[in-house]
Amino acid sequence: MPRFFLSPQAVRGTKARIEGRDAHHLLRVLRLGSGDPLEISVAGRVYQTRISSCEDDAVVLEVLSQLSASHEPPVRITLWQGLCKGDKPEMVTQKAVELGAHRVVFFDSRFSVVHWPPDRADKKVRRLQRIAEEAGKQSQRDVIPEVLGPKTFSSLLAELAGCPGLILMPWEHENAVNLRSLDVEPPLEISVLIGPEGGFHPDEVQAIHELGGHTVSLGPRILRTETAGLVVLSIIGYRWGDLGSA
């Protein structure tokens, strides 16, 4: 069933209103009309609604009931993704949202091979946020994950220093520990650090170790940066989350 994300201001009692691009998509692409059901998510709460009337640029909904089932994973995951080339950020964002990431934060580091010019970074992040919203609709998330960046590695460290959760850094030179053998209590919050195409500098790895983070192996093969994060999210979702559950 189609799902749309609305601000609390768009809901008044048992009525809700969809306007702008979403209204156009609902009417012109999905070709829904009066009486058709759809779901809306408002501040993380999901409601069953029915279209009561359609205007040229807006759709009015009747709110029927709140749904109790949650589509959010039990563990909050932030994917810290090293800046990568071409359209890889778009693919990483889309798939990370589908796999349950709560945030996607892009960062610049010592071996980054691309950099986002300041005059283009805001536009890039806005586009990635739109991709996250569309992926959230498609995968029926309850919330739209936030996309941020580009952060410096020093600002990444500063944020992680105050993070109470588990910190994971997949690293090609780690041979002793993997995500299956890692002996930790089931976490409620996880930060996953994925290096850029050039990988991590040893000083960056040491800095993460000093914060109590864990370097982990993803196996004998070297994965591309756009692949590694999605593999980690899948393993986390299976081991500590809701992937594979009924």
Image: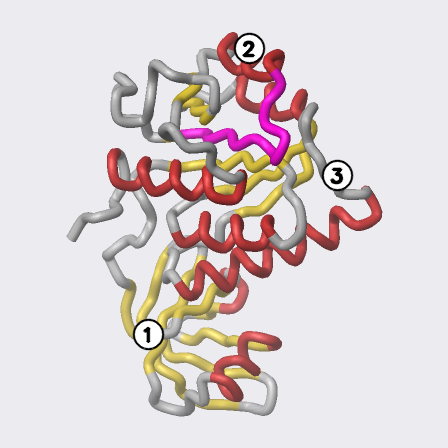
In the rendered image, residue 195 lying in the magenta stretch gets the answer yes
Residue 18 coordinates in the image, percent (x, y) = 52, 76
Outermost residue, left side: 246
Q: Amino acid at mark 3?
A: His
Tell me the number on the disc at residue 206: 2
Tell me the number on the disc at residue 115: 3
Q: What is the magenta range? A: 190-201
Residue 241, compared with residue 184, is above or below; it is below
Q: Secondary structure at mark 2?
A: helix
Outermost residue, right side: 119
Tell me the number on the disc at residue 75: none
Q: CA distance from mark 2 to mark 3?
A: 23 Å
Q: Secondary structure at mark 3?
A: loop
Residue 151 coordinates in the image, percent (x, y) = 67, 33
Which residue is painted at 58% across and 24% down in the image?
159
- Left or right for 27, reference 140: right
Which residue is painted at 26% across and 21% down in the image?
181
Q: In this rendering, which labeled residue sits more in front, label 2 or label 1?
A: 2
Q: CA distance from mark 3 to mark 1?
A: 39 Å
Label 3 or label 1, whichever comes before in sequence order: 1
Give the quarter of the figure containing the N terminus.
Answer: bottom left
Return the residue at label 1: 1
Give the class, few, some or many, for how many residues have Cα within 10 Å of label 3's Cα (few <14, many ≥20). some
- Left or right for 113, reference 167: right
Residue 107 coordinates in the image, percent (x, y) = 64, 34
Q: Nearer the viewer, residue 108 or 72?
A: 108
